[in-house]
Amino acid sequence: MGVGSDRIGIAVIGGTGFERILESRETVLIGTPFGIPPPIILGDVGGRRVAFLPRHGLEHSLPPHRVNYRANIWALKSLGVERIISTNAVGAINPDYRPGDIAIPADLIDFTKGRKYTFFDGAPVIHIDVTTPFCPELSSLLLEESRKRAPAVRSGSVMAVTEGPRFETPAEIRMLRALGADLVGMTASPEAFLARELGICYCPLCFVSNMAAGMQERVTAEEVLKVAERLRPIIDSIIRGAIASIPSERKCRCATPAGGP
Ligand SMILES: [Zn+2]
């Protein structure tokens, strides 16, 4: 693993169940200096080797604030992964957005508060550039594939990330709106930043599962699951299309996050 044609160049991080689109599946457990991530499923999508990491575990037992983000990203890096597409159920803060919309965000505001945020914990002190927090190459690909398949697609969205596992309060949502957020989720930080630290391209594919607190009567986990179920075939097809059209060479600058060649 990790060399030659068997190299796993592409990974999907998402909700349990995505493995159904992988052909000739095998499950691997990978140890890392940061602990053991959930079982990773390897397989083929349209002839390309892909790793799928169920973010919340195969039994969906890990809440967003307990996900071992460093172990997850490290394990994918050790497989040779250079690109990560992540799927995210998000709440809409922008009143023009609707449940069922697909969104490819362009920026992120981090309101998480108790996570392990970095691999660069000691010397030398390294500050990575996150002027474009999500890979521009992956995001334009995802946008193109989404527009072919989904009825409503939002681009350039600003995503707020909260600690969870509770949903936000109406006052928090008003604050996030005033700060320019269109969407709110619970996992893109530190996922995006850890991927960037290791030079991996990362882009979320978001789907709006509900209007955020204060914009509808109440927010329930059942509703989030219901929308996820309804959108599942569209999301699978967008990811399949994106995987097929990812060029083998990267032209973005994600591989050198702290500068250099
Ligand atoms: Zn990139």
Image (cartoon, rainbow, N blue to C red):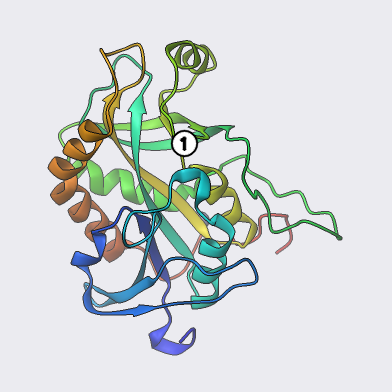
Q: Is residue 113 left or right of residue 64?
A: right
- In the image shown, does 154 or 225 lie closer to the viewer? 225
Tell me which residue sits at (76%, 49%) in the image.
Answer: 127
Tell me which residue sits at (29%, 57%) in the image.
Answer: 16
Q: Position of residue 67 (x, y in %)?
A: 50, 52
- In the image shown, does 135 or 219 lie closer to the viewer? 219
Element at label 1: strand
**Numbered disc total:** 1
Q: Position of residue 154 (x, y in %)?
A: 31, 31
Q: Position of residue 32 (x, y in %)?
A: 59, 73
Crowd band around label 1 with a 10 angstrom C-alpha radius: few (<14), some (14–19), many (20+): some
Answer above or below: position of 94 versus 122.
Answer: above
- In the image shown, does 147 or 195 lie closer to the viewer? 195
Residue picked out by circle 1: 106
Q: Is residue 58 left or right of residue 68?
A: left
Asked whether residue 204 is in view, the answer is yes
Q: Is residue 163 left or right of residue 257?
A: left
Q: Position of residue 66 (x, y in %)?
A: 51, 49
Tell me the kind of residue under disc 1: Ala
Instruction: Specify whether tag 1 is near ligand 1 (CB below 8 Å).
Output: no
Answer above or below: position of 257 versus 47.
Answer: above
For the N terminus, the quadrant is: bottom left
The image quadrant of residue 208 is top left
